[in-house]
Amino acid sequence: MPPGRDSTESIQAEVLRRHRRIALACLVAAGLIYLATQFVESPGYWVLLIRQGAEAGLIGGIADWFAVTALFRRPLGLPIPHTAILPRNKDRLGEGLGRFVADNFLEPAVVLHRLEQAEPSVRLGGWLQDSGNAELVADRVLAMAPDAINAFSDREVRNFYADTFRHQVTRLDLVPVAERLLRMLSEAGYHQRLFDRSVRVAREMLLRNRQLIYRRVEERSSWWIPRRFDRKLAEAIVEGVEEWLHEISAENHPARLELDRAIYALIANLGQSAVIRERLDGIRDELLESEELRAMLESIWEDLRSTALDGLEGSDSRFRLALVNSLRRFGRTLQDDQDARERLDARLALLLRELVLPFRDRIGRFIADVVRDWDGETLSERLELAVGRDLQFIRINGTVVGALVGVVLFVATQAIF
């Protein structure tokens, strides 16, 4: 039972009892007045007028008491036909209520028109701009976030998402991805930067290992060649390679142009090469099956999870402050940006059109099933608590109006006859 429902029903029950007492008092008063006039000997005009009004009021009050009571139960427990109407017809009532809601409240044109009139994006934007509301939403999100994050710690959940990830990646065609990636890198000149970096690293390694090259040349030289010639040869080799590396580092060197042609040829032929496609698929499948990748992903997830949980703690956490500020900025955006409001309203309308309205018949059947599962006494009690106060006014009005009609009829009869 929702919080606060007991107190609400207690208040409704007390109001219903009070109005029942008022309606009963009116009925009793009419009956006592009618009874008292019977003891007047030789009643005159005014006594007969009062008697006639009290009699009519008593009849009207009893009739309306019977009508109101017959809706919810059998009057005085007597098996009178066509009484206890609501409990005996609750199944039909539930079906009618479900059809009424589905056909009138959930009719697509009505719902979408009401949504458009409500301007939800404007209301949401104004509501989120209030710092208290933004903090309220942030606190609710942060309260649910740890449970949502910890749910992914379950082995079954993690295996499910791992299998889902593997299945989706397996269906991925890597050739277009590789083609777009290479095209993007080449257009940005990253291949030339990589070329420059490679040349620079090669020169640094050459200079760093100069003495090693000298020794290797001397070790592989014939015994009869003088060592100074070996030294000269080694120095010439090193200087030649260094000079060549310096030459190809120039921007207009043919090696760079050849690299450009090779990259563009690779991009052009990538989508038509079955060998490259097979190799990319093989690399993908091998990575997906590797324990190293699984361990790496789990390690990344644990680090992210711990970081997220640590950031969520505390009412003054940076994550909370950032979330509150983001919500307020979102509210300001909705207030100031008409395009943003139109996009949000369009998405809400699409959500209703695609996810809610197609199931309006099922919603109607759900309402009918809920009412059908109620027992008759429960249905009567809930409906009587909801509308019983107003129905007691029918009893009161029946007594008062009946008395007035009786008075009018008496006066008219005396005047005519």
Image (cartoon, grey):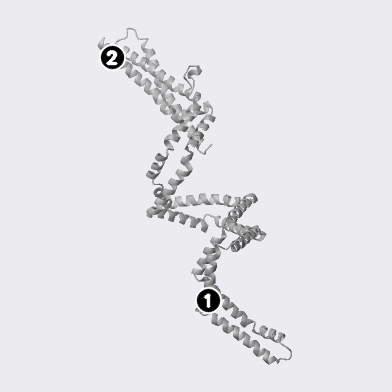
The amino acid type found where label 2 is placed reads Val
**Image spot of residue 362 (x, y percent):** 50, 36
| Closer to us: 200 or 377 | 200
Residue at disc 1, secondary structure: helix
Disc 1/disc 2 C-alpha distance (Å): 119 Å
Q: In this view, does 215 lie above or below 2?
A: below
| Closer to us: 67 or 187 | 187
Q: Is residue 263 above or below residue 393?
A: below
Q: Residue 221 carries which label?
A: none
Foreground mark, 1 or 2?
1
Which image quadrant: the C terminus?
A: top left
**Image spot of residue 82 (x, y percent):** 46, 19
Q: Specify whether residue 14 is in view.
A: yes
Residue to which mark 1 is pinned: 256
Q: In this view, does 33 lie above or below 145?
A: above
| Closer to us: 180 or 65 | 180
| Closer to us: 227 or 292 | 227
**Residue 311 quadrant:** bottom right
At a point 39% along the width and 23% down the height, the residue shown is 396
**Image spot of residue 322 (x, y percent):** 49, 57
Left or right placement of residue 182 versus residue 217 in this view? left
**Image spot of residue 260 (x, y percent):** 52, 72
Residue to which mark 2 is pinned: 411
Crowd around label 2: few <14 · some 14–19 · many ≥20 (10 Å): some
Left or right placement of residue 141 versus residue 218 in this view? left
State the residue lying farthest toward the right: 223
Q: Is residue 176 above or below residue 388?
A: below
The amino acid type found where label 1 is placed reads Arg
Q: Which of marks 1 and 2 is nearer the N terminus?
A: 1
Crowd around label 1: few <14 · some 14–19 · many ≥20 (10 Å): some
At a point 67% along the width and 86% down the height, the residue shown is 214
Left or right placement of residue 384 versus residue 235 in this view? left
